[in-house]
Image (cartoon, grey):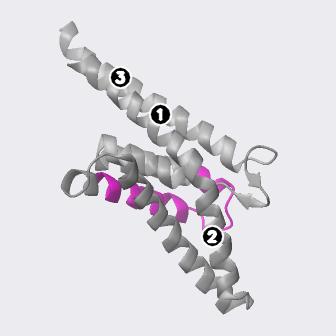
Amino acid sequence: MNASLNPNKGNVIRIVIYVVLITVFYLLCMARGTLGGFWFVTVNAMPFLVASIGFFEGPYVGGSLGLYSGLLMSVSSSTVEGAEALVMALFGIFCGSVALMLMRRILPSVLFCGTVFLTARGIISATYYTMFYSIPFLNVIVSYIEIILVSLIPGIIGYYLVSSIHRRFSEEND
């Protein structure tokens, strides 16, 4: 009986560690007075962290923890309530599915997915700001390029943290 509980206990501990990691990343990247402002550029490492979790844990865990990270991001966002949660959950499901079918669980794959996500978000935001506020499209795109570049380092750190947590608990289950 005890041997059958160990894999589930390891999975629960791993998920709790991911929840704490997402919370810490949120606090470091989004809270006022922390790392959130590098030269007035917001660090957004959440897509890279959710992509890493999706790649290593699959679409179900990636979607669930993407939902949690999106709920956290909704707290400090001016978007419609829950929109961030829905988008991040779908992104986590997408990354987990892509990892199962197409891509390997390596750093360039995770960085590619996170960068594509932030680029698509930048294009949508640039279109929105151009249409409704008459802000030049290129100015918003340049600001999103800066966000992507500043977010790569925390994204890489998140990838290595997620891969080491996954590796640690995978070895324990074997």
Residue 124 forms part of the magenta stretch = no
Is residue 164 positioned above or below 59 on the image?
A: above
Coordinates of residue 129 in the picture (x, y in percent):
67, 84
Magenta residues, as a range?
72-96
Q: Amino acid at mark 2?
A: Tyr
Magenta segment's dominant SS is helix
Quadrant position of residue 134 = bottom right
| Crowd class of label 1 (few under 14; some 14 to 19; many from 20; radius 10 Å) | some
Residue in view at x 19 percent, y 15 percent: 4
Coordinates of residue 131 in the picture (x, y in percent):
65, 92
Decide if residue 142 is on the left or right side of residue 57: right
Residue 44 seen in render: no
Nearest the eye: 106 or 174? 106
Quadrant position of residue 82 = bottom right
Give how far apart the Cα atoms at labels 2 and 3 are.
35 Å
Dots 2, 3 in contact, CB < 8 A = no
Residue in view at x 66 percent, y 65 percent: 146
Is residue 16 positioned above or below 149 on the image?
A: above
Decide if residue 125 is on the left or right side of residue 18: right
Q: Pick whichever of labels 1 and 3 is earlier in the sequence.
A: 1
What residue is shown with label 2?
A: 144
Dots 1, 3 in contact, CB < 8 A = no
Q: Amino acid at mark 3?
A: Arg
The disc label shown at residue 161, or none: 1
Coordinates of residue 1 in the picture (x, y in percent):
17, 9
Give how far apart the Cα atoms at labels 1 and 3 are.
11 Å
Q: Pick whichever of labels 2 and 3 is earlier in the sequence.
A: 2
What residue is shown with label 3?
A: 168
Decide if residue 8 is on the left or right side of residue 14: left
Nearest the eye: 20 or 38? 38
